[in-house]
Structure formats: structure tokens, C-alpha cells
Image (cartoon, grey):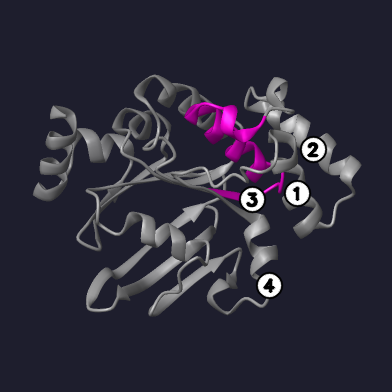
């Protein structure tokens, strides 16, 4: 079996007196899709933010491509390899769609504007948003904004993509268009760690599912193991509650 490209070991994180992560650890291999599931407040998003260095763990180690990222000297270069899409899109509202995808390439990767535009249009086409290249961000629907956010991240040619509940801010009818883009990325072999409440999507696309509860990993396994044969009563209770919603 291939060596993991992400190794998370005994990660702890507190905010004041609130302990959010209590010794979390798991591995991700190349081309693997790992879905983190669990109740709100279980620590999933905080863990993802630690992997992208938006938060720093109090203790523990996170190694990506063999590098101890908690001591990296160049955060921007690291984030170019590990892209992230957020719940609220985080697009630049004063730029059109194309400029949103061009600007980070020029600033971080030092690409020429011509190369950056060429890359941007290729990735906008991949997510079905090329025809909106000249559109203002404020004119887009939530699903369109999230697809642009994914294209912008892909423009950096990341080796790994992190998704923090990418559909939670969307109206129900827009969820499918974003999940379809993510399915396509999984089919193309992009390594992904996804925090999601979309259980059907996790069951279909994930290679591994990690159930977090109260800051710990309660159970992890294949989608079949987690969804059809959960070993933990907490996992069973969560899945029952998710299905009943």
C-alpha cells in the first residue's frame, strides 16, 4: 500500500477553555477521497483549518508530502499545493469571475497574466463557468459562486483539495451542481479531504469515511463499513438522525 501523503497525529486544539480537538489522527493516501462526518461542533472544520494552517494546533503533528507543515517557512507556497474551498466561497466581490481566478496565480505563483488567464479559462470550463468569465461575482447564484471558488483553487494546481462543507450555504436546488463538480474531481484522481453533511455523497464518492464526535475520531472505515455496519453506537445514532432529517 502506498505511503500516506497526509499524516495527522495526536492533534489537539483549544480555544480558551473549550477543547475542540482531543488527539485526532488519521492518514490520507494519494488519489484518496476522505469524508469527515459528524455533528456540528465535533471539530471537523477546525481540523481542516489546521491542515491548511489557518489554525495552529496546540500539540500534535501534521505531515504533508513528508514535510512537518507546522514548521513550514513558506505558508503561501504550501497553500498553493493544498487548496481549500470554504462554506461562504470567499471570492473577491470587487473582481469579476476571471480576475478572481487570475489574481492568486499572479500573486502567489508569479505567473504571467497571459498564462494565468489561459489556466483560469481552462478551469472555469471544467466547472461549467467559462461563459461567466466576465460576470460580476455579486450577480452569481450560490452554486455558481462555489463552482468559481473551486475553479480558483484548481488554478493553483493543488495536489490536495480541502472542502469545508462546500454545500451548506447553498439552496437545496444548487447543491447538486457543486457535488457533480466534486464527483468529477474524484473521478480524475484528485486527493480530497471533505467535511460534509451530504451522507449520500460521502457514501458514493469517499474511499474512507471518518466519523468525528466531541473532538475525537469515533470511527473510520470504508463507506460500506461506516454506513452499513457501524461499530460504534454513537456512529449509529448520528446516521439515524441524519437519515431522519
Residue receiving disc 3: 159
Q: Quadrant of the C terminus?
A: top left
Which secondary structure lies at badge 3? loop
Task: Look at the magenta stretch and give its main secondary structure.
Answer: helix
Which secondary structure lies at badge 4? loop
> Dividing the picture into quarters, in which one does residue 71 lie?
bottom right
**First in sequence: mark 1 or mark 2?**
1
The answer to whether the residue labelled 3 contacts the one labelled 2, judged by CB atoms less than 8 Å apart, is no
Which secondary structure lies at badge 1? helix
Residue receiving disc 2: 119
Q: Nearer the viewer, mark 1 or mark 2?
A: 1
Left or right of 41 in this view: 50? right
Q: Residue 21: x, y in percent? A: 29, 68
The answer to whether the residue labelled 1 contacts the one labelled 2, judged by CB atoms less than 8 Å apart, is no
**First in sequence: mark 1 or mark 4?**
4
**Range covered by the magenta-colored residues:** 136-161
Q: Is residue 29 above or below residue 20?
A: above
| Cα distance in 3D space between marks 1 and 4 | 19 Å
Q: Residue 94: x, y in percent? A: 66, 43
Residue receiving disc 1: 103
Left or right of 4 in this view: 237? left
**First in sequence: mark 4 or mark 2?**
4
Identify the residue at image location x=70%, y=41%.
95
The answer to whether the residue labelled 1 contacts the one labelled 4, judged by CB atoms less than 8 Å apart, is no
Amino acid at each position: 500500500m502506498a505511503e500516506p501523503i497526509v499524516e495527522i497525529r495526536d492533534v489537539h486544539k483549544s480555544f480558551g477553555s473549550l477543547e475542540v480537538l482531543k488527539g485526532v489522527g488519521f492518514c490520507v493516501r494519494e488519489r484518496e477521497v476522505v469524508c469527515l462526518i459528524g455533528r456540528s461542533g465535533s471539530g471537523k472544520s477546525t481540523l481542516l483549518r489546521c491542515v491548511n494552517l489557518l489554525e495552529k494546533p496546540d500539540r500534535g503533528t501534521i505531515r504533508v508530502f513528508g514535510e512537518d507543515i507546522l514548521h513550514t517557512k513558506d505558508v503561501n507556497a504550501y497553500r498553493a499545493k493544498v487548496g481549500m474551498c470554504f462554506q461562504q466561497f470567499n471570492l473577491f466581490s470587487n473582481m469579476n469571475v476571471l480576475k478572481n481566478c487570475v489574481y492568486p496565480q499572479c500573486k502567489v505563483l508569479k505567473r504571467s497574466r497571459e498564462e494565468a488567464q489561459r489556466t483560469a479559462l481552462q478551469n472555469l470550463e471544467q466547472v461549467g463557468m467559462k461563459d461567466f468569465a466576465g460576470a460580476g461575482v455579486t450577480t452569481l447564484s450560490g452554486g455558481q459562486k462555489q463552482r468559481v471558488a473551486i475553479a480558483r483553487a484548481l488554478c493553483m494546481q493543488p495536489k490536495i483539495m480541502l472542502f469545508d462543507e462546500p454545500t451548506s450555504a447553498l439552496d437545496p436546488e444548487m447543491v447538486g451542481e457543486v457535488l457533480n463538480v466534486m464527483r468529477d474531481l474524484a473521478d480524475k484522481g484528485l486527493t480530497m479531504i471533505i467535511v460534509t453533511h451530504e451522507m449520500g455523497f460521502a457514501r458514493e464518492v469517499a474511499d474512507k469515511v471518518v466519523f468525528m464526535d466531541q473532538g475525537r475520531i469515533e470511527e473510520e472505515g470504508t463507506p460500506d463499513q461506516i454506513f452499513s455496519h457501524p461499530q460504534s453506537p454513537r456512529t449509529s445514532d448520528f446516521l439515524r438522525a441524519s437519515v431522519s432529517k
